[in-house]
Structure formats: structure tokens, C-alpha cells
Image (spheres, rainbow, N blue to C red):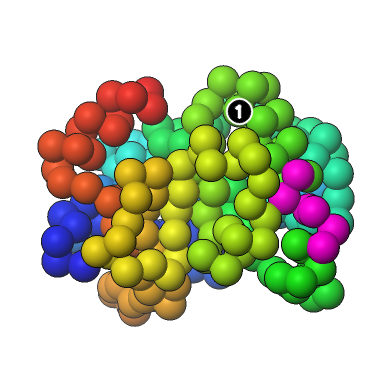
Amino acid sequence: MSRFPIHGVALNQQAGFVDFQQLANQHVAFVYLKATTGASYTDDQFQSGYDRAEGTRLKLGVDHFFSFSTTPTAQLDHFKKAVGTRLGDLPIAVQVDFYGDYTAQVVSQRHLGRRLLVFLNKLRLTTGHPVIVWCSQKVWQAVKVRGLGAYGRWVTDSNPGQLSRRIRFIEYNPDGKMTINGQAQTVSLSVFNGTKVQWKQYLNRVN
């Protein structure tokens, strides 16, 4: 990951109370906060974490975990209610993964990628904010439908030598360690797919 100078983390309520200024002092450039999952779950730390992170130089993003079992409209309504205007500086990340009975085969056979695309389109149009898809290559292949390729991606398993321009972020360690508040805490570690100059250009485009 040494070829990627812009580093960031993704946090959820399991990280507990986080001193965002300490993160900024450890050469972290951006942070994503878990906001919602599906149509009913809201991360307990989202509101307070967002408000505290705003006072730092960190670029801020929010993410939603997509549910295959609830409708795009129900998920959108829940997201808007939970997040409000707290949309951050970065694209909204929609995290997609297999869970329970929703395996690669089930997702592909039921064409659930279409439901995902409807949600992404509704989310982008309703919020007026850019959106990216956060998933593994295996998930991407299972959900891929016409139109999905227009969205930027955040990959969890990719050879850095084969990254396309549509890939914005790379999660290289979902169980990374950082010292925050004097203690080692588990955080998801990612990098921006580009140089410092490209990072500044990217921020200008998404803001």
C-alpha cells in the first residue's frame, strides 16, 4: 500500500468513542462512518461521531449496508431519516455483501442487482450526492447489471496493479489496528486509489 499516500478508516459503533483529532494526527486523511443498515438499523455512534469529526481536517463520508430482503424505498426512507443533512464531503458508500441465505448463487439467480441499482439511483437523485459501491469482486460479479458500472467502487480484494479508474478506494485490511485514546482499536483500513494531486482533484469533483 506504500504506493497510495492517502489513507483512511471506516468506523462503526464497535470502535466505541473515537478521538478524531488523534486520527487526523496519524496521517489519516478520510474517515467513513457507518450510518444505517437495511430499513431499520442505525449505528449508535453515527450522530455523535459525525458531529465530532466535523471539527477536524478529516474528509468525512457516511455508509449504508444494503439489504437484499427489504425494498429500496424502505431503505432510502430510513437512511434519510437517520442521516438527514449529515452527508459528508465524500460520496455516500453503499456496502454490499453476502449474508445469511443470500449467497452468490441466490443473489445472481434472483437478479437482486437490479434492486441494488434502483436503490443507488434513488439515493443519488434524492440526496443530490455522489454514491459509490463498496464490495468484493465476487459480490460485484453477482450483482452486476447494466447501469451499475456507472458508479464508482470501493474494493475489498483487488490487485493494485489491475485497478480501473472506476475504483476510488481500496480496503486493504478490514481488521486493522490503530492506537486511539491510548488503546489499540480495530478499524477498517483503506486507501484512495491515486496520488495526492489526484486526491485533491477528486475532492473538487465530489464537492
Is 107 or 18 nearer to us in this picture? 107
Is 17 or 119 nearer to us in this picture? 119
Q: Is residue 174 visible?
A: yes
Question: In the figure, residue 12 lies in which quadrant?
Answer: bottom right
Q: Amino acid at mark 1?
A: Arg
Task: Residue at 58% x, 58% y: name it.
Answer: 140
Is 157 or 48 nearer to us in this picture? 157
Relative vertical location of residue 187 with respect to residue 38 in this rendering, above or below: below
> How packed is label 1: few (under 14 Cα within 10 Å), some, or many (20 or more)?
some
User: Which residue matches tag 1?
Assistant: 124
Percent across and percent down for residue 189 are 36, 66
Percent across and percent down for residue 100 are 80, 75
Is 96 or 86 nearer to us in this picture? 96
Image mark count: 1
Which quarter of the figure is the C terminus placed in?
top left
Look at the numbered disc 1 and give the secondary structure of its residue. Answer: helix
Task: Residue at 38% x, 49% y: name it.
Answer: 167
- Whether 111 is among the magenta residues is yes
Percent across and percent down for residue 153 are 46, 49
Q: Is residue 31 visible?
A: no
Which quarter of the figure is the N terminus placed in?
bottom left
Question: In the figure, residue 58 lies in which quadrant?
Answer: top left
- Answer with left or right where residue 134 lies relative to residue 73: left
Task: Residue at 45% x, 66% y: name it.
Answer: 156
In the image, which residues are magenta? Answer: 109-114
Percent across and percent down for residue 176 are 36, 75
- Whether 135 is among the magenta residues is no
Question: In the figure, residue 41 lies in which quadrant?
Answer: bottom right
